[in-house]
Each structure stands twice: as C-alpha cells, then as structure tokens.
C-alpha cells in the first residue's frame, strides 16, 4: 500500500511540475501574441498557429488517430470547438488590452474551475480551496488595479477565462476512459480549431486574405506559439488531466499571470510596481493554499 501511494504521489508530482511548466510557457505567449498582432489580424494568427500544430500533431499521432473509435474523435472535436472559442475571445482580447491584463484576467479560470468541477458533482469545494481561490483572485485584482473600469478587450479575455474552466472540466469528463491518446487528442483539437478559423476567415474575406506579407517577427511568433504554447502545452495539459484533478490543474495554471506579468515587463517594458509584486505574492500563496487543501 505504501509503495502504491508513493508511486501515485510521484505521478501526481510529475504531472504538477509539467502543468507548472505549461503555465510558464503560456505566460510567455501573451507578449509574443501581442507582438504578432502588429503584423497580422487575429484570425490569421490563430489559423497559422493551429494549422502548424495540426500538421505536426497529425503526423505524430497518425496511428493513434487511425485506430481511435469515432466517438472518441467526436469527443475530441467538441473540445476543439471549445478551444476555438477560447482562442477567438482571448486573441481578440489581447488586441484591445495589454499583455499584462490578459495574463491576469485569464487566471480567473483558477477560481471558476473548482466551483464548476465540484458543482457538477453536486457539492461545494473544500473550504481551503475556496479561501485559496479568494486569495488568488485578490492578487489578480491588485495586479490589475482593481478592474474598476474594464475595457472591451478585458471583457473578451474574461469570457476566455470562463471557457478555459469549461475546457478543463470537460476534458476530464469527456476523455475519461477513452482510447484516444493525449497526442491524438491534441491533433483532433488543432484540426478542429484550424478548420473553424479557416471557415470564419473565408466567410469574411476572399481566399487571397490567407496570404501574409509579414516578416520574420510574425513567423517566429507563429512557430513559438505553435510548438511550445500549443503542441507542447496542450499535450501536457491533456495528459495531466488524466492523472490528476481539474481543480489541481486549474490552481497550477493560476501561476500563469506571474509569468505573463514578468515577461510582459521584460519583452514589452510594461510597468512593475510594489503593488504588482504584492498581487503576485497573493496569487502564489492562494494557489498553493488551494493545492494543499485539494490534496
């Protein structure tokens, strides 16, 4: 029994560390995406990001996709549609607000996910999880200056945060017991997002709109967002959700605004003050308080 607990504990720790790495990479995605949007519109950025991801992951997971039952692929496509809605709201939001605000607001999924996860089971989260979420959200509010007058971009990112919580909980429930591998799931999601984005583009523009004249800055951002922030990150998240709970994943992802805030300062020279450092500390404290309570 002790050996079994130790093995499960080691698996959970590895999953936690992997999700923490995803939070760091996604934190970097906001300043990178903000820079890319100076060169191309929102839908084009999403399309090329997920076209690249779909091409790579379909090649990697081809055998798994071919052997997967149709119902598993359909479940992955549903998750892909949710992912499309997330990136549409999030990327459009980044275009109209700062990279820092985007990273902060998106972390509100940390608060939403436990209530959604436990609520679907007909119960409230443990008190420690509620208090930890409250401390973390207090840190976000401090970092964002109280959010007293959010703009349109901020509200779009808030929608993305709600959809992220839906995505985390839905992935756990829809993929529980499925034969579709994490790599194949990432491929299905990416193909779905690329297809829906292409349809949205062609509904508004002629096919010639797909041609991009942007320089190396845009394509470098696409490669980074595709390889690290989509292929690597979503594969890790999909795998982690099969080894740990949605609540734990959401709390670990709650550290994402810290990385986004730090990298926005480094890459885009967005300001850092003592107040933002206080908010960052509350996010870390609330996150790990919630993690310990959930355990």
Image (cartoon, helix red, strand yellow):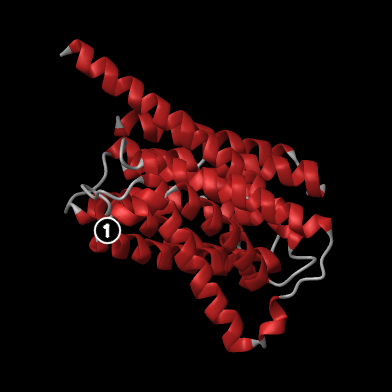
Query: What residue sits 72% from the left and 83% below the top?
Result: 208
Q: Can residue 141 be seen in this view?
A: no
Residue 45 picture location, percent across and down? 66, 66
Q: Is residue 132 visible?
A: yes
Residue 232 vs residue 115, the one in the foreground: 232
Q: Quadrant of residue 156?
A: bottom right
Q: Measured along the vertical axis of the image, is residue 205 above or below residue 87? A: below
Q: Callout 1: helix, strand or loop?
A: helix
**Mark 1 burial class by Cα count in 10 Å: few <14, some 14-19, many 20+:** many
Residue annotated with mark 1: 72
Residue 126 vs residue 218, the one in the foreground: 218
Residue 215 picture location, percent across and down? 84, 61
Quarter of the image with the C terminus is top left
Q: Is residue 143 left or right of residue 71?
A: right
Query: What residue sits 26% from the left and 44% below the top?
Result: 125
Q: Measured along the vertical axis of the image, is residue 223 above or below residue 82? A: above
Q: Quadrant of residue 263?
A: top right
Residue 142 vs residue 102, the one in the foreground: 102
Q: Quadrant of residue 127?
A: top left
Residue 65 picture location, percent across and down? 36, 55
Residue sitting at the far top: 2
Residue 71 picture location, percent across and down? 24, 63
Q: Is residue 124 left or right of residue 97?
A: left
Quarter of the image with the N terminus is top left
- Number of numbered discs present? 1
Query: What residue sits 55% from the left and 52% below the top?
Result: 56
Residue 171 vs residue 247, the one in the foreground: 171
Query: What residue sits 35% from the left and 66% below the top?
Result: 78
């Amino acid at each position: 029994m002790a050996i079994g607990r130790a093995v499960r504990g080691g698996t959970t720790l590895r999953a936690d560390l992997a999700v923490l790495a995803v939070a760091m990479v996604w934190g970097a995605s906001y300043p990178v995406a903000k820079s890319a949007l100076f060169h191309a519109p929102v839908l084009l950025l999403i399309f090329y990001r997920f076209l690249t991801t779909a091409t790579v992951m379909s090649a990697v997971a081809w055998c798994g996709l071919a052997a997967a039952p149709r119902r598993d692929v359909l479940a992955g496509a549903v998750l892909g549609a949710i992912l499309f809605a997330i990136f549409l709201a999030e990327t459009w939001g980044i275009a109209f607000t700062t990279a820092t605000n985007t990273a902060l607001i998106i972390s509100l999924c940390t608060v939403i996910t436990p209530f959604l996860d436990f609520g679907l089971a007909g119960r409230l989260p443990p008190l420690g999880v509620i208090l930890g979420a409250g401390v973390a959200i207090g840190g976000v509010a401090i970092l964002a200056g109280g959010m007293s007058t959010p703009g349109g971009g901020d509200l779009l990112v808030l929608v993305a945060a709600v959809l992220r919580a839906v995505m985390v909980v839905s992935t756990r429930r829809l993929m529980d017991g499925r034969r579709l591998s994490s790599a194949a799931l990432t491929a299905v999601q990416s193909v779905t997002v690329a297809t829906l984005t292409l349809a949205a583009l062609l509904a508004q523009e002629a096919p010639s709109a797909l041609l991009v004249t942007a320089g190396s800055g845009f394509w470098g951002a696409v490669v980074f967002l595709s390889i690290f922030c989509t292929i690597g990150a979503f594969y890790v998240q999909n795998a982690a959700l099969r080894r740990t709970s949605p609540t734990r994943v959401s709390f670990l992802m709650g550290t994402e605004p810290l990385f986004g805030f730090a990298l926005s300062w480094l890459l885009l020279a967005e300001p850092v003050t003592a107040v933002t450092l206080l908010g960052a500390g509350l996010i870390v404290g609330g996150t790990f308080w919630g993690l310990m309570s959930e355990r």
